[in-house]
Amino acid sequence: MHTDLHGKVNEAAWRLTLGADQLHLTRTSPMAQPEEYVLDIGVASIARRWFKHEPPSALEVEYAIEEIENKLETWHRLAGQVLPLHTPDSQILDIAKLAAIPLQAETALSRDVVEHTFGRLVAVIQGRPASVEGLPADRLFAARLLILREFMHHMKCESIIVKT
């Protein structure tokens, strides 16, 4: 965070959008033009390529993790840029709801909460009824949660702010 010549606080940040076929990451700053980065990791494409079951099997999740990690590795130079992470993605807000996070105009979802929610999904994958965990058993939810988890872990993001 820094102050411009007029005394206004300006903060650079990342904006994450999980699309059907691509992940978009934009570095925003009031002092510079946005920088956009795109990876061919999308919620629908991961679900389509790897998840043949609902919920997906443990092996299907492992293959998806491998692909996501390999693609995120190309962004290793960005991982050191510790900036606030924001998203306009309402479906990430759904993850916050499932994690019982109180919703606000800007809802913070920590990496620990995402990891805990993923652990709940793993329990479902291992045979626990999805209804017991209060999670959807569908492939798109699993893909979205998995991509978010891997992104936050590999990019060293402590939390993501969902703007509603």
Image (cartoon, grey):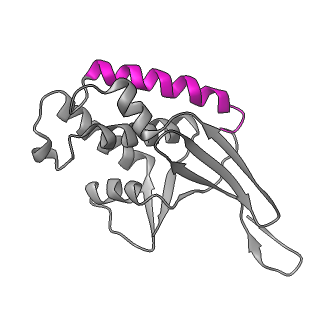
Task: State whether residue 121 is above or below residue 95.
Answer: above
Count of numbered badges drawn on the protein = 0
Left/right of residue 112 with respect to residue 81 in the rendered view? left
Can you say whether 73 is above or below 155 in the image? above
Residue sticking out furthest to the bottom = 6
Farthest right residue? 5
**If the image is split into quadrants, where does the C terminus sit?**
bottom left
Residue appearing at x 58%, y 31% in the figure? 72
Q: In x, y percent, where is residue 24?
A: 59, 46
Please provide percent x and percent y for residue 83. 65, 53
User: Magenta: predominant secondary structure element?
Assistant: helix
23 or 161, which is in the foreground? Answer: 23
Is residue 119 depicted above or below 104 in this figure?
A: above
Closest to the observer, 65 or 47: 47
Residue 161 part of the magenta-drawn span:
no
Which residue is at 31% across, 27% downward?
Answer: 51
Query: In percent of the image, x 24 and y 23: which residue is there?
Result: 57
Residue 116: percent from the left, percent from the top? 31, 43
Please report the bounds of the magenta region as a residue range.
58-79
The picture quadrant where one finds residue 120 is: top left
Q: Quadrant of residue 80?
A: top right
Q: Nearer the viewer, residue 51 or 119?
A: 51
Q: Position of residue 8 (x, y in %)?
A: 78, 78
Is residue 69 in the magenta section? yes
The N terminus is located in which quarter? Answer: bottom right
Going 32% across and 68% down the picture, which residue do you hit? 102
**In front: 58, or 152?**
58
